[in-house]
């Protein structure tokens, strides 16, 4: 497995240019040396001109062309000089090589462009809030991060009784508390956002104990168990940088100065919390997509919200072996590559919505990711080794504001839609967080499932008519998608495929629109809505990047 270890980072990246060699194909058992030779050959450069070489990206090509699985790698070559030889120019023209993209750091160069913010409050300790707070603190701002839920140790203690049948704590649960919604997750770190801050964030995670492979693995993940060792180290990093944290402190409202009379923007002077008022010069709101009570408070105080399309469907679960066989052809490769994952999609047309898989957790488990009692919503998590015998993912359709407008009034109608169906599923499961479940063939045929519906779901399942509980357009989209996915992974829509519902919080139903350049909320001069709850991210990495980027903008703007 030598070839899976990262190459050493360049000793002095300023020496010459860094080239990115794209799409180097590699057998699964190829050595470092083989990759090195291929990359150098593809770039058309001389070995002695290469100072250092390291992974930029490694993904698995699981299409099994001629029955073979391969890695496809991007490799960065740090060159002695920036001279473009004719063979290098030729390789660049062919598109196989280009200059490596620029990368940013969390710390900004000091100088007059950097505004001294004396105090910034960040609400929410999820990846968005955390990386906003850390970036601000590293650049000298005085930061207080406020989190309604408990720090990790307390969060865990409160979750144990809930999972044993106790009541749900609306402030500390699977969605709220240190680390935010992703703390009990697969910790997948891939994002479709190619951003110059991505590497700086991944490096913070590695320094806090995440494996180095996350720096280049296209399907990087940390896993809940390892994430729980990383989070305390990140917390220590923020405190060391000068930030302070207030756990179990709920943000309850804005203290606003100024008005819109004469077109002047309003200004936040302080925030009201469950532990008193905190004065601030700027406020970063990183509350995630499930803080419905907080959305309502903000809406009531004049923060602008827009409804947005969001994902809605169920979790599907299979034996992991079925997925691994379907993807790799046999189980042998799983020893080297780990259990297989998938990413499936079927486009919609004029009459049917599209559907797709999302947040796939190989070797994982289904959990109840809820923050309000009397409602049911599921999601997936896994440990670092992906060791459970189950594979689950969300299979969802995207519902539009038009489709849910009748469930509630104004821009928060999507919340009413989510609550309606979460209640329906909760009741159909018997009112104790047991989830309604249906085998996929029964869902497709419109009949109840019989017998034991074995699932990894924490609270267990009982037979339910998911085909009747879902809105008809979502039911139709999922049926069409599942039938197609069965052609891509044999047995996907067969007897061993189980649907467990509901999955209603894969993305946010609202956006808090903000100025493109200043990142400030409409009508406010110093309010920065960020991350998934503000509608600007969809996942751990994109939320973290949005947080760090917003911090940079805040530090460069006089508010
Ligand atoms: C079970 C599960 C598994 C997931 N798996 C993955 C995965 O593998 N990979 C991936 O990329 N994404 C995953 N996600 C999604 C990912 O967790 C989110 O996209 C991400 O956490 C969003 O980050 P955020 O900082 O915007 O918000 P959040 O992480 O939701 O953080 C918001 C924080 O704000 C706090 N808060 C809310 N209201 C208040 C208030 N009034 N006062 C004080 N604090 C408040 C909350 O307690 C919370 O801690 C998963 C989500 C869940 C639920």
Image (tube, rainbow, N blue to C red):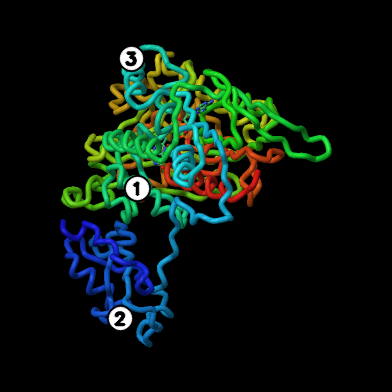
Instruction: Residue at 58% x, 22% y: name it.
Output: 277
Q: Which residue is mark 3?
A: 161
In this rendering, is residue 101 above or below 304? below
Please tell me which residue lies in front, 4 or 457: 4
Judged left or right of residue 367, residue 300 is: right
Instruction: Residue at 44% x, 64% y: name it.
Output: 102
Q: Which one is earlier in the sequence, the residue at label 2 or at label 1?
A: 2
Which label sits in the foreground, 3 or 1? 3
Q: Position of residue 173 (x, y in %)?
A: 41, 23
Q: Quadrant of ligand 1?
A: top left
Dot 3 crowding, Cα within 10 Å, few <14, some 14–19, many 20+: few
Which label sits in the foreground, 2 or 3? 2
Instruction: For residue 538, say whether it is visible.
Output: no
Q: Which residue is mark 2?
A: 45
Q: Which residue is mark 1?
A: 342
CA separation in Å, label 2 and label 3: 61 Å
The numbered dot on residue 255 is none
In this rendering, is residue 545 above or below 435? below
């Amino acid at each position: 497995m030598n070839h899976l270890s990262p190459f050493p980072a360049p000793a002095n990246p300023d020496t010459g240019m860094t080239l990115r060699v794209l799409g180097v194909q590699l057998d699964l058992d190829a050595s470092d040396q083989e990759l090195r030779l291929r990359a150098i050959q593809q770039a058309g450069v001389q070995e002695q001109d290469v100072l250092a070489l390291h992974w930029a990206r490694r993904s698995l090509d699981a299409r099994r062309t001629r029955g073979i699985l391969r890695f496809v790698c991007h490799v960065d070559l740090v060159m002695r000089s920036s001279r473009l030889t004719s063979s290098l120019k030729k390789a660049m023209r062919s598109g196989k090589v280009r200059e490596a993209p620029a990368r940013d750091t969390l710390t900004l160069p000091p100088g007059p462009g950097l505004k001294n913010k004396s105090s910034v409050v960040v609400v929410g300790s999820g990846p968005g809030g955390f990386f906003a707070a850390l970036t601000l603190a590293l650049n000298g701002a005085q930061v207080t991060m406020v989190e309604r839920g408990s720090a990790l140790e307390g969060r865990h203690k409160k979750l144990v009784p809930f999972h044993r049948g106790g009541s749900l704590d609306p402030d500390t649960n699977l969605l709220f508390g240190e680390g935010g919604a992703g703390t009990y997750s697969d910790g997948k770190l891939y994002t479709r956002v190619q951003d110059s801050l991505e590497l700086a964030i991944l490096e913070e995670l590695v320094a806090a104990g995440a494996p180095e492979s996350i720096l280049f693995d296209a399907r990087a993940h940390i896993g809940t168990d390892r994430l729980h060792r990383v989070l305390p180290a990140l917390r220590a990093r923020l405190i060391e940088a000068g930030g302070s944290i207030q756990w179990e402190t709920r943000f309850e409202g804005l203290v606003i100065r100024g008005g819109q009379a004469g077109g002047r923007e309003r200004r936040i002077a302080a925030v009201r919390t469950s532990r008193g008022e905190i004065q601030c010069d700027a406020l970063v709101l990183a509350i995630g997509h499930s803080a419905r009570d907080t959305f309502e408070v903000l809406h009531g105080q004049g923060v602008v919200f827009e409804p947005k399309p969001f994902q809605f469907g169920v979790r599907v679960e299979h034996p992991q072996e079925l997925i691994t066989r379907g993807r790799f052809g046999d189980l042998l490769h799983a020893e080297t590559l780990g259990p297989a994952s998938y990413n499936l999609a079927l486009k919609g047309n004029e009459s049917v919505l599209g559907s797709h898989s999302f947040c796939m957790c190989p070797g994982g488990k289904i959990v109840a990711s809820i923050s309000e009692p009397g409602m049911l919503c599921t999601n997936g998590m896994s440990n670092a080794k992906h060791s459970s015998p189950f594979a689950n993912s969300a299979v969802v359709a995207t519902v539009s504001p038009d489709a849910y407008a009748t469930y509630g009034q104004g821009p928060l109608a999507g919340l009413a839609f989510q609550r309606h169906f979460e209640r329906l599923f909760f009741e159909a499961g018997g009112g104790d967080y047991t989830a309604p479940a249906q085998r996929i063939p029964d869902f497709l045929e419109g009949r109840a499932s019989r017998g034991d519906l074995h699932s990894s779901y924490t609270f267990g399942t009982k037979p339910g008519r998911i085909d009747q509980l879902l809105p008809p357009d979502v039911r139709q989209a999922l049926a069409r998608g599942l039938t197609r996915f069965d052609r891509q992974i044999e047995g996907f829509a067969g007897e061993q495929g189980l649907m467990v519902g509901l999955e209603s919080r894969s993305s946010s139903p609202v956006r808090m629109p903000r100025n493109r350049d200043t990142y400030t909320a409409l009508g406010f001069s110093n309010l920065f809505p960020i991350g998934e709850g503000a509608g600007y991210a969809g996942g751990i990495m994109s939320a973290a990047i949005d947080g760090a980027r917003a911090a940079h903008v805040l530090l460069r703007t006089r508010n």
